[in-house]
Image (cartoon, rainbow, N blue to C red):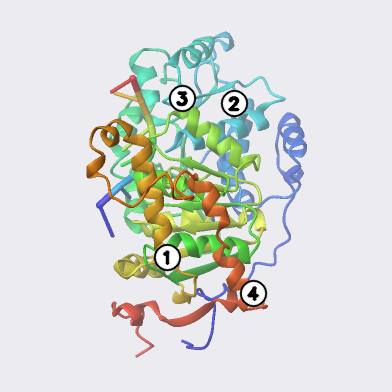
Amino acid sequence: MSDTASPSVQPDTAGAEPAPPARFDTLPLDPKLLRAVADSGYLTMTPIQAKAIPIVLQGRDVMGAAQTGTGKTAAFSIPLLQRMLKHENSSVSPARHPVRALVLAPTRELADQVAENVKKYAKHTHLRSVVVFGGVDMKPQTAALKAGVEVLIATPGRLLDHIEAKNCVLNQVEYVVLDEADRMLDIGFLPDLQRILSFLPKARQTLLFSATFSPEIKRLAQSYLQDPILVETARPNQTASTVEQRFISATDDDKRAIIKQILKEREIRQAIVFGNSKLGVARLARSFERDGLRTAALHGDKSQDERLKSLDAFKRGEVDLLVATDVAARGLDIADLPAVFNFDVPFNAEDYVHRIGRTGRAGASGLAVTLVTKSDARLVADIEKLIKRTITLDTFEVEPERPRFERRRRDESVEREDRPARAASPALRTPAPSTADPFFNKPYEASSRDEPPAWEKAKAASPVKGLSSYIKPKRQVAALFGAKKPAPAEG
DNA sequence: AAAAAAC
């Protein structure tokens, strides 16, 4: 255990496996699938793909655990499509196209993304797929289901709707996949999941995939699997070693300034900022927007149309910041995302692993910054325990935000939204703002840009580039907050 | 302390 200046998290020094990566074309796959894989630009398999695909091809149930961003979707969809091509369902006439494979995901955006992948791999085959999720018109989904699909990708609630409306029949399902399986098996989803599974044949192949499996969920999962094979790569619940993880001591008032300063310092092109609540996320997004950052918000109180627009704009690079709840924590594949910020420490340590897994995907590097207040000690200790790494808490020097500024903005918004009241009883108003004041009618945005940005001063003060000049390693988080000792030092 | 997933 070292106390020297070190990054927030010790680098992953675990021995890398030197096995040469196997190529997809060494697999016994239908040429139509191999062509689609090649079209996608993939040549060699990731470790989870190399391990899981042959086992799925054997028809075995699989619980697959692999780090974020290592291609779990391909690891189950390619071999499933192969099995569907090879073992045609002879009990039903091919014209009827019964649902043969069902993939369940915990968020609409993730279901959509998985469906895109399945379509991509199935494009040269006759196998048809459709995705159904809530928040959008049911009719097109119904029409597609009635026309017949072999692969159905869904979120639980909308699927149950379709089942009840008799838009689809699931008694011919041969393959079931739970993507983000530990989430699908958690208490919030379990009742819906159990109902859905009750409509499926008992004899089937079931696949569970996630980056995180707690021991309890692992045990629970056994009851949904038959003689399963556990496929794990590296250590479970791990974060990618290419992600630089920082934990910074902050106060609620400092958090936005710290994020803005790091964005500038590191010249970060794009980032996701995670918050714990929908309201907090909505407010935070507005705040960044006012600061002139191109920002989109993504949370469950937005319409599905808005959600898709936010995510699309972010993926296309039209916005710099995506401020999101944990709806965006899992599975979403955003190419080359350079950074993730945890404005709030997530309530579940597992969600930390998933959130920061949006960056550093497919071997790319990434930065993950978590802002920690005094009340977060327990949560940080949980994360430390889960990822089995030592977390140190850094301090960050930031230019204080100017309180006068905030006050003027609030006054102004009251003036604007509350015009009748103001006209009715001008005496109740705070005396200060008069139309003679040159600042009075100025929009907030304009005056905001008049301010020399805090990072400008910070940069001038220190010519050294990079975060390290502003972040100073502090004591270990456990020591700082007086939490329980993480691990006794051998004896 | 929350979020997600159906209308």
Label 3–label 2 contact, CB within 8 A: no
Label 3 vs label 1, nearer the camera: 1
Looking at the rendered structure, the kind of residue marked 3 is Val
- Asked where in the image residue A483 lies, by quadrant, the reply is bottom left
Q: Is residue A461 above or below residue A176?
A: below
Query: For mark 1, what is the residue?
Result: A254
Q: At numbered mark 1, what does the secondary structure look like: helix, strand or loop?
A: loop
Of the two numbered discs 4 and 1 on the same chain, state the one appearing first in sequence. 1
**What whole-number distance in Å separates the C-alpha atoms at marks 3 and 2?**
13 Å
Q: What element carries label 3?
A: loop
Chain under disc 3: A
Whether callout 2 and callout 4 share a subunit is answered yes
Q: What residue type is labelled 1?
A: Asp
* Residues tagged by mark 3 and mark 2 found on one chain of the structure: yes
Find disc 2 in the rendering and name its residue: A87
Give x and y (percent) for residue A236: 48, 60
Say which residue label 3 marks.
Answer: A173
**Mark sitting earlier along the chain (3/4):** 3
Q: Residues within 10 Å of mark 3 (few under 14, many from 20)?
A: many
